[in-house]
Image (cartoon, coloured by chain):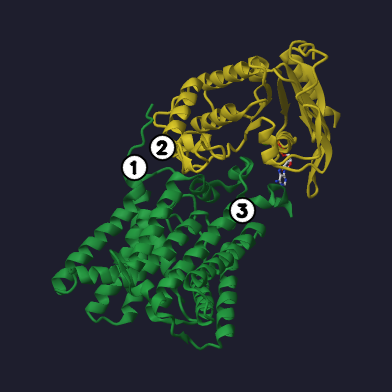
Chain colours: A green, B yellow
Amino acid sequence: MRNKRKFHFSEYFQSLLLLGVLLVLVVLLSIYSDAFMTGKNWMNILKNHMAHQLILAVGMTFVISTAGIDLSVGSILALSGIILAFALNAGMAIPLAVALALFSAAAMGAVNGLLVANFRINPLIITLGSASVFRGLAIIVTGGTPIYGMPQEFLQLAKGDYWLPIPVLMAAVVLGAALVLSHCTKWGRYTLALGSNCEALRRLGVNVAWQKVSVYALSGFLAGVATLIISARLNTAEATAGSGMEMNAIAAVIMGGTLLSGGKSTLFGTTVACLLLSVIKNGLTMLSVDAQYQEFIIGMLLLLAVVVTDLRQKRLKRSGGDAAPGAAIPKSCSCDAGSDKKTV
Amino acid sequence: MDTVIASEPPLLATEGIAKRFGNIRALQGVDFSVCAGQIAAIVGDNGSGKTTFIKILSGNLRPDSGTIWIQGVSHAFLTPKQSLAAGISTVYQDLSLDDYRDVAANIFLGEELTYGGLFLRKKEMTRIAGDLIRDLNIGIPDITLPVGSFSGGQRQAVAVARAVYHGKKLVIFDEPTAAMGVRESAAVLRLIRSLAQKHMAIIIICHNLHQVYEVADQVSIMRHGKILQTTSTADTPLEQLQQMIIDADEVD
Ligand SMILES: Nc1ncnc2c1ncn2[C@@H]1O[C@H](COP(=O)(O)OP(=O)(O)OP(=O)(O)O)[C@@H](O)[C@H]1O
Ligand SMILES: [Mg+2]
């Protein structure tokens, strides 16, 4: 009997596939452009393209691994950014304003979580609705006009260097904490179990409703962290901030190999996918390719990643093993409402 | 129940437990009891309410009416936490496993060993899980693989190991040997007997009457959400019990 955990290659297939694509891309781009393979450009990729995207995608990885989805992170990002700007303009101390923004972002996430935990409604619908609500609020309170001008010290969040650029450090801390959370704590285990067998978790005495609330709250909180980077970089808070970012985050998570049906996630895959997407954005800008192509290429890559993985799994497993990452629609899981409600 | 000392109160008893699912009356007044050290079997047709009944004992369903006594304390219903805290653990018919996780993660799900309540003690959990599976004498070549890749019997073994490890006073088995081979079933039955010898109470649901007779002290026949009869296996030969089940059929 084996007791030692060994490296299961197939668990990492999709991440490694992406890593391969990334390597090819890096080689091609360095041939085409001398400016690509420079330390300055790589810092630019990490700081301006990847940092906020990875932070959002880490939160999304947790949400998707519960068999849920969070379409509201872009809206939470916008609304908490506006709260931040109002607080700063009202003369609140920067640490306080930041704490307020993070707290309100987490609270918005918790609202999603409460709705998901207490109603038998698909999280897709719930967060689609809350996304509109939060975005709508952002437009109402700003009257649709961007809020320019933040205190100089606050802008350091984006410009500052502390051995590494601060956004990169923030993303690294978030990723590190997420890795520990997911692999070394009960919370990480329970989050995954929500996706693979929520009912079993409930039977074993775990408060699954609270667990769900905490996952969505974390996703909201991380949207708040991302808003710090973005509003400091643009020196602006606006109601349209972050729109579409939830889709990029979802794409990165799924491309990385996390199952949309829940129960299995890979932060490594999410990170590689975010890096790949960032390199594509940077590369296309360098080659002065139209921004419209970005969308096209990201979509093709997402399809490639899931189709290749599915083909491989079909070949490997005659019996029904893992589903392909994109194979299942997220199901609403509200087993905490009690299995005796099934008849309702 | 001649095996039970009259002065000892039952570890667990129920009175008039009823449960409806919409129009289906799954349970209609179940009176049942089991004492420490005793193995009580429940047999009955498919859909007679056995699983529903044990889900009420494990805190997964709320009965519409009735009372549950645990060591003399009455409850209208239990939550999963209360049931576990009372020392009740359960092997569910559907096994309740997290298919993407390995054996140790499944055995300790909800009861993880941690450093300071925070960080998982993975090595220790894997070691204990390995020992448990070895004691059960069921061949699982690699316990670090996700249990979703196991055979039906191996998965059942993991569920049994979990319940046995966490059960303190009462272990409930809902068809624990359904997917197992002869050798593996024998191992599980042996394990059940050894638990009873350690003064634990056991409830076992099983369709195989021979297996029931191998371990159980008392057998309850369940039908249409009621317990029709409870007899001691020592007093009633297997053939007679079989006849009683068939007769119960004709009464309707
Ligand atoms: N969650 C539920 N919703 C609706 N009906 C249910 C539910 N659970 C059980 N039932 C019904 O209650 C009745 C009893 O089911 P139960 O699972 O307790 O039977 P059982 O005795 O365990 O059967 P088996 O031997 O097949 O496992 C059945 O008619 C079943 O359809
Ligand atoms: Mg059953």
Task: Check disc 2 and report the residue beneath it.
Answer: B145
A28 relative position to A242: left or right: left
Task: Check disc 1 and report the residue beneath it.
Answer: A8
Coordinates of residue B139 in the picture (x, y in percent):
44, 25
Coordinates of residue A169 in the picture (x, y in percent):
34, 63
Quadrant of the snapshot with the N terminus of chain A: top left
- Which chain does the residue under circle 3 lie in? A
Up-down relation of residue A200 to residue B9 (above or below): below
Q: Nearer the viewer, mark 1 or mark 3?
A: 3
Rendered residue at 41%/33% (across/down): B123
Quadrant of the snapshot with the C terminus of chain A: bottom right
Rendered residue at 52%/65% (across/down): A220
Taking depth in this image into account, of A268 and B240 the one nearest to the observer is A268
Tag 2 and tag 1, C-beta contact below 8 Å: yes
The answer to whether tags 1 and 3 share a subunit is yes
Q: Of the residues shown, which amino acid type is indicated by label 2?
A: Leu
Q: Secondary structure at mark 3?
A: helix
